[in-house]
Image: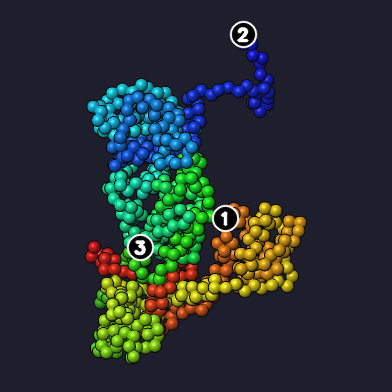
Amino acid sequence: MSDQPDQVVMPGGVPDHPHVRRLPEVIVNRIAAGEVIERPAAAVKELIENAIDAGALRLDISLDGGGVERMIVTDDGVGISPDDLTLAVERHCTSKLGDETLVHINTLGFRGEALPSIGAAARLSITSRPKGESGAWRIRVEGGKTYPPEPVAGAYGTSVVVEDLFFATPARRKFLKSARVEGRHVESVVRRLALAVPQTAFRFVLDGREVLDLPAQDMAARAAALLDASEADGFLNIAGEREGMTLSGFICPPSVHRSTANGQFMLVNGRPVVDPVLKTAVRVAYRRVIEPGRHPVVALMLTVPPEQVDVNVHPAKTELRFADEAAVRSLVIGTLQRALEHGAGVAGVRPVLSSAPRATRIWYPPEQGQMAPQPAPAYPAAPQTSGMAEPRLMFGDAPFARTLPVPPTSFAPGGANAPQDARLAGGMVGAGNPFAQVEEAGGARLDHPLGAAVAQVLDTYILAVAADGSLVLVDQHAAHERLTHERLREQYLSGRVQAQRLLVPDVVELPRVQQDLLLARQPMLERLGVEIEEFGGGSILVRALPAMLGRSDAISLLRDLADELEADENGAPDEMASLDGKLDAVIARMACHGSIRAGRRLTPEEMNALLRQMEATPRAGTCSHGRPTWLKLSRNDLEKLFGRR
């Protein structure tokens, strides 16, 4: 008979005087597994990280049933000895942590939780053969029960097989998605880890279908392969440095974007991360040049001194804590914005058609007995001296395109006979050459990236031919809108924003924390045209707002600013969507109304002047609304459109 008194159970099922007891090791491992191994992608991530830390030069990943039925990760790394195999499946046993201060961590894994967590929730088998050993050894763990190592045949390296994931924790298994969805999550993890080690070959097979087969390559080639070669054609190589931190990588122009952030790969000290600070910085850098709701495509590599970043935040090791988040934000935003400020058509910035349009119907002349089209009106042929002919269309429609005469051979670029607009823009084409080239002072020839205008279509689109023979199409309204926007914004940033004082100041009541955040940034707000002062009793008095905003609601504006500053206390007001976004929206509206309209017929000089200004204007690849201003079709692109490739 027990000496312990009977416990009184309360109505809620909790004993009146509960006793503290030690949980069995199996239950402890299963609880930990729920945090470390939340889905098949998390298990694959841990296994690949172990292989990378083992120095693998080739990785083979194979999944069945989205990873729930089986996952196999095989590497050619250093391997695990028989004695270490037993320790490897115990919690908090690792060979990677040499610094007990958890500061200088040079490996992807270091917590010693992954293998025991997988073994507690699934059927785990590890076969390994270290270099120089005559044979391999295998250890098995099923639902937390470990079996002794046994000798087997095996190649050098390690092969990990995980079967029947979450069979020991069925509550977790029923919350998994379909095999297709889980497989997509695994693929995303494999791609991010493949970027971290371009010198390692990756092969990924999902349900018998080869998804990736990447050889060992350099970082540029690996990034291009992971983000698709067609998008990588427009890659910009970036580099920045600030306070001991360095940023490198590749970004796509604003014309390349996606509906989700899956195209954003970020490494911090070689570790793939999903960090909100970096994601916010990328969004801010692209905000003025990309369509709302779309996400840019980037591959960023950030190097931070180990003592300024904490990687031991979460068992998944994808979250970080920076000692100076403001410096990291500034480095990322500044580096990306400098790269995006190149004019249109510069090297590396090449908007292209994302998908080739397909003809859905071809018009044929009617057969006898059917209604014939009206005869096409006769158009006078273009003078043969122009070098071009405006052909008579055969479908009964008037031509919507105007071809431009090629300048006479005596027309020298920048010469005395050149039109004034062309001379101001840097010169038009000369010597009968349709490829826009100008003579520089030193005698060198410089190809204009956007080429020379040769026609105008629908009085809206400019057709130009570049020096390499590519066809360039320019939306004249969108392009001029960006030029006007940049000119107005430069005026706005060059000095103090004009403030409009309110006839009756508004009183905004805010929590004390938000009030302090706004008052601490009072000088910055005044530079942006917002004048505030403390009113007492947890209130702020608004005396002036930017004149550009017109009759704006001061109360809602201040509350939005306060909410954003509280959510990101390192953010500056001029980066907040509530103020800077509204000011920029006003500038965009002004630029739209003050730009060349679609449907306006331009002279050849005006067209070429527009092209030259686009090449010299920052962010000219997209308009104020994030839409592309120009497209470039190379010979390969044209041949694909016509089915020649």
**Viewer-proximal residue among 307 and 291:** 307
| Above or below, comparing residue 215 to residue 544 in the picture | above
The answer to which image quadrant residue 503 occupies is bottom right
Q: Are marks 1 and 3 in contact (CB under 8 Å)?
A: no
Q: Earlier in the sequence, mark 1 or mark 3?
A: 3
| Residue 172 seen | no
Q: Between marks 1 and 3, how big is the CA–CA gap?
A: 32 Å
Q: Earlier in the sequence, mark 3 or mark 2?
A: 2
| Residue 425 seen | yes
Residue drawn 34% across and 33% down? 160
Report helix, strand or loop for mark 3: loop
Instruction: Residue at the far front: name it.
Output: 244
* Whole-percent x, y for residue 111 in the image: 45, 35
Residue drawn 32% across and 25% down? 82
Residue on which the image places disc 2: 1
Q: Crowding at label 3, few (<14), some or many (≥20) Cα neighbours within 10 Å?
A: many
Residue on which the image places disc 1: 570
Q: In which quadrant is the C terminus drawn?
A: bottom left
Residue on which the image places disc 3: 234
Report helix, strand or loop for mark 1: loop
* Amino acid on which disc 3 is placed: Gly
Report helix, strand or loop for mark 2: loop
